[in-house]
Amino acid sequence: MAALYTTASAIPGIIADPATLAPQSVRCLWMRPVLNKDSMAAFLPSVVFTDGTDCPLACEMNDLHARQFCQRLAAIHDWPVKDGRVLEGSAEVAADRVFASLDEGDRMEMDGKGWVNIPGMGRMAAIFAHEAGLPLGVAVEGITHKLARMFADIEAKGAMPPHDVKKNMRAATEVACAKLAELYGDETQGPGAGSLLPGQFGILVADYHYSKGSTDELFQRGLTAALEAGAEAWRAQGEDEMDQKTDLMLDASLRHWFRLTGRAVRSL
């Protein structure tokens, strides 16, 4: 298998194939603003590596198509999407910030690395969900499925006895839900992705961010997180056709967001 690219300077062509990117070396996907051949505003989906170099991933597109392109890749690889300009911050920076915000009893440092206990895991998951802009119902469902999968992996590896796995998973989930209730205040929980059709789920996310007065940047962050939560729910239900569900959810959410924010939605 050919080596994956970790910097734009090593890519031989003008446009990079997304399949050739080293996932751990990608800082974010960037909707780079450009002008098309008619001198009209367009966007160039690009990759920004952790070393700061960038490279286009496709030809210029309109707003809707560029977002769809970037969000699909982001959902697969858990990459952030930046709109217009590359902003400071990364997943690593966010993790460090959340870790530092935990109570002393939830965390510790050993050999220069940060560790969290079981309650800390639950609280971190809740903080990440809230910061990502997930509606409360989606956050509760997504965290529940994510913790269940994580502890199932721990059990499968034999790293923890089965009775401890169940006890710790329940404890982490309860702490996460309590932290979510604190962070979201009086917000109504609402449904999760598992009880909605993909299109309904996408509209729910757009409506939620519109009600919060979110910018495009915040909406995109929330949409990426929602896609991940949706994938967790669909996987837990044993459903297939994940790509189709992702496309339906993404298309419905972006189109509805464009309508809500007063922008034209062109037919594909």
Image (cartoon, helix red, strand yellow):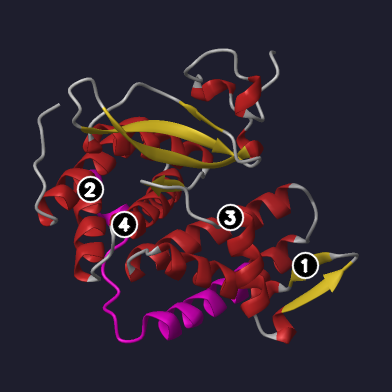
Determine if the magenta segment contains residue 186: yes
Q: Which mark is residue 91?
A: 3
Rendered position, 13 above or below 144: above
Q: Disc 4 versus disc 1: distance between alpha carbons? A: 30 Å
Q: Disc 2 versus disc 4: distance between alpha carbons? A: 10 Å
Q: Nearer the viewer, mark 2 or mark 3?
A: 3
Q: Is mark 4 in CB contact (under 8 Å) with mark 3?
A: no
Confirm whether residue 267 shows in the render: yes
Q: Which mark is residue 219?
A: 4
What amino acid is found at the position of numbered circle 1 in the picture? Gly
Could you tell me residue 165's position as x and y percent?
69, 64
Front residue of this view, candidates 144 and 261: 261
Horizontally, residue 215 falls left or right of residue 224, namely left
Residue at the disc numbered 1: 114
What amino acid is found at the position of numbered circle 4 in the picture? Phe
Q: Is mark 2 in CB contact (under 8 Å) with mark 3?
A: no
The kind of secondary structure element at disc 1 is: strand
Q: Nearer the viewer, mark 4 or mark 1?
A: 4
- Residue lying at 62% horizontally and 61% vertically, measured from the top left: 93
Residues drawn in magenta? 169-198
Assess disc 3: are there few (<14), some (14-19) or many (≥20) residues with their C-alpha within 10 Å of its C-alpha. few
The kind of secondary structure element at disc 3 is: helix
Q: Disc 1 versus disc 3: distance between alpha carbons? A: 15 Å
